[in-house]
Image: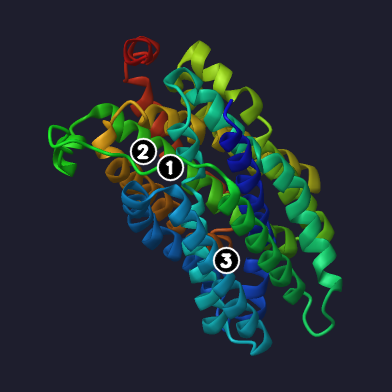
Amino acid sequence: MPISVWGLAIAQALLTTGNILLVAVSALIGKQLASHPALITFPVAMQFLGLIMATLPAAHLMHKMGRKVGFILGNCIGLVGTWVALQGLEANSLMHFACGTFLIGMAIGTGQQYRFAALDVCSVEQRPRAISMVMAGGVLAAILGPNLAIWSRQWYDGNAFVGAFYGLFVIYVLALLLISSLPLAAPLKTTSQQVARSYAELFKQPLLVAAMASGAIGYAVMVLLMTATPIAMQHDDFPFSNIAWVIQWHVLGMYVPSFFTGRLIRRYSSRRVILWGCAVLALCVLVNVLGNSYWHYFIGLILLGIGWNFTFIGATHLLTFTYEPAEQGKVQGINEFMVFTAAALGSLLAGVGVDKLGWAWLNIASLPPIIIVAWWISRLADQRARVSVKN
């Protein structure tokens, strides 16, 4: 496996560490600063809005100027966003803090291309393993992120959450140094014969629609329940350390399967792995509905992570068979836009969902989209034949 893939896995670990840190504290900061329950997850929603707005421009920029330029720019935006969020915390301003999370979201949106960058330096046969390796970087993040959220509470006396953003600043500096040193692929050169299809033509492919739907709905359900969990657990009087542990094991559930998801895809097909992911997400909902003890949250969130891993990595691999080189930036960009628009909607609904519906009914409400994806994917032909032809 090329050294760049290993470097991108570390970069993914740093990115995900920062993301987990934000998940652990952003909703609680929103609760501290918000004047209305509906605004509790406003900073998280702004983070996803920034992520969404960055996806298409980042994909097209990297297609023309290369991955390295895009990733360096993204990390610089992350540094600025962290500083702005810190100013918002100091001023006890929800809007100011949300502006910072918006910029951080733009940095995260750019970093989401790490898994696609790994594909640039691999053969077709290595793609499932490369995607899995980069995503497996999140295992390190699962250990660092929640612990950093706990440790950082002691770093600054005035506000328990300020230290987390100093930690986030260091993460973006490390990622910037790492990306600057990696030998990433040069921008793709296309000939005049390679004409990119229009979006209308691309979306005539059932495979493309299914891949995007799987990634978007799997991510939306995961973000909805993950973002709602700290709020629900705090409502049930669990201490912050318990919340952080649940999030940590959830993230382990998200990324540990990455060590074998690629092999499962090559053996059984992306389609079947996505269906397994939908089944695990449904099982997560069942566990969450059955009770609100610590172990219900703990087991439910692990299952949530595994279900996301199967649907997201399966969808990412499925997507690679829907475009030609000249269409790479276009398809990858619109995919990220769709996926993280759905995720933003999930984060926006999390706070008001817990407030208006309660934890159990919020989980039940997430079932219909899971069922829709499972039905949609089940109608596709087995993808092993298609992969074999493409190889």
Q: Earlier in the sequence, mark 2 or mark 3?
A: 2
Left or right of 59: which side holds 12?
right
Q: Earlier in the sequence, mark 1 or mark 3?
A: 1
Residue shown at 61% from the left, 53% from the top:
15
Of tags 1 and 3, the one toward the viewer is: 1
The secondary element bearing badge 1 is classed as helix
Residue shown at 63% from the left, 43% from the top:
289
Q: Nearer the viewer, residue 7 or 146?
A: 7
- Write down the residue under mark 2: 213
Q: Are marks 2 and 1 in contact (CB under 8 Å)?
A: yes
Q: Position of residue 257 (x, y in %)?
A: 65, 29
Which of the 4 image quadrants contains residue 374?
top left
Q: Nearer the viewer, residue 319 or 242?
A: 319
Look at the image and name its color scheme: rainbow
Q: Neighbour class for label 3 at 10 Å: few (<14), some, many (≥20)?
A: some
The secondary element bearing badge 2 is classed as helix
The secondary element bearing badge 3 is classed as helix
- Write down the residue under mark 1: 217
- Write down the residue under mark 3: 355
Report how far apart the C-alphas of labels 2 and 3 lie in the structure: 28 Å
Left or right of 209: which side holds 129?
right
Q: Neighbour class for label 1 at 10 Å: few (<14), some, many (≥20)?
A: many
Q: Position of residue 53 (x, y in %)?
A: 37, 62
Q: Neighbour class for label 2 at 10 Å: few (<14), some, many (≥20)?
A: many
Q: Amino acid at mark 3?
A: Asp
Report how far apart the C-alphas of labels 2 and 1 lie in the structure: 6 Å
Of tags 2 and 3, the one toward the viewer is: 2
Position of residue 95 relative to residue 216, above or below, is: below
Residue shown at 86% from the left, 72% from the top:
154
